[in-house]
Amino acid sequence: MGKTLIFGHKNPDTDSITSSLVMANLEKKLGNDVEACRLGNINKETEYVLNYLGVEAPKFIEDAEDKTEVILVDTANPDELIPNIENVVIKKIVDHHKLSMKTSYPLYYRAEPVGCTETIMYKLYKENGVEIDKTIAGLMLSAIISDTLLFKSPTCTEEDVKVATELAKIAEIDVDTYGMDMLKAGTDLSSFTIEEILNIDAKKIDLKDKKSIIAQVNTASIDEVLTMKADLEAAMEKSIEENGLDLFMFVITDIVESTSKAIVLGNAAHIAEKAYNEKIVDNIIELKGVVSRKKQIVPIMTENA
Ligand code: MN
Ligand code: MN
């Protein structure tokens, strides 16, 4: 048996990247032969985190050989994993999303409805009596800030806040200053092509029988992102055609004001009007106070599909 590979979802965010690193550290401390991996490019926010903490990114992989043993973090959805996920052996999953997979064998599965995988990882360190050092604390804290948008997302629980407060002490980090700098670093879109912007945090999600992509981007200025509206729409139309989609929703989230607007295209665009009781004007819908795809978009869009 080779090393056990640890990875999160495709289009990795700060939680998927740091959780693979943090899980790899825990497993190594417990005497297991593991390697942290990633299934995509490091985004700007995560790049800021890794540079700040002086940590190297996990190894990029596109696939894994059949029968390889793997540990999944921050996802339990086969659609956002390697193509042959059915043929590898999933030893463990630690996640905070809905369960979207089946295995034909028993495994360690730990999921809690908290705001971030790292909040669960913190508990796993405690349960195993493994020390959380300054760097590991910084990685965990960064992911909690990222997934909860500095505790402002409705996905954020009291437990996330409590764990983050503990971690900030160990990491010697001022949460508000560091958190805003980190989130702002993630809003720099200057080096991306239009296709890349749409793909930074895109998820394929079926809304009942409607084949959809719901992508999200964080910004400090929605208007600035909308200067690219025509190009974004053209690329979204192309993706709808190529992927046979019913809906492409591109959510632009203002991390300072905690609100969003979305560009909505496709024959199922009306679902958004029904879901939010708002008119789509010039392909744009207001999503007042919406920041969380998981809590404020996917369930309500599914319900109205
Ligand atoms: Mn994630
Ligand atoms: Mn997460």
Image: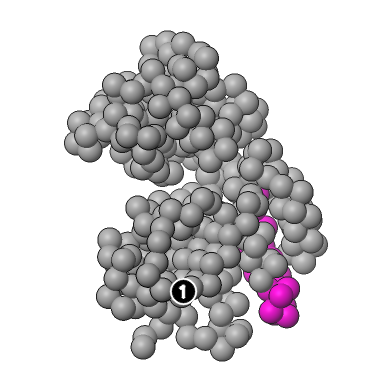
**Residue located 55% across and 45% down the image:** 185
Image location (x, y in percent) of residue 278? 51, 13
**Residue located 59% across and 48% down the image:** 147
Residue 39, quarter of the rendered image: bottom left
Depth check: give the residue in front, 246 or 178: 246
**Residue located 36% across and 21% down the image:** 269
Image location (x, y in percent) of residue 178? 69, 50
136 vs 207, left or right, is right
Image location (x, y in percent) of residue 256? 65, 32
Bounds of the magenta segment: 125-145
Q: Please check the rendered image and state whether residue 114 is part of the magenta-colored stretch, yes or no.
A: no
Please identify the quadrant where the N terminus is shown: bottom left
Q: Label 1: which residue? A: 106
Q: What element carries label 1?
A: loop
Depicted 177 relative to depicted 69: above or below: above
Depth check: give the residue in front, 21 or 183: 21
Image location (x, y in percent) of residue 242? 19, 36
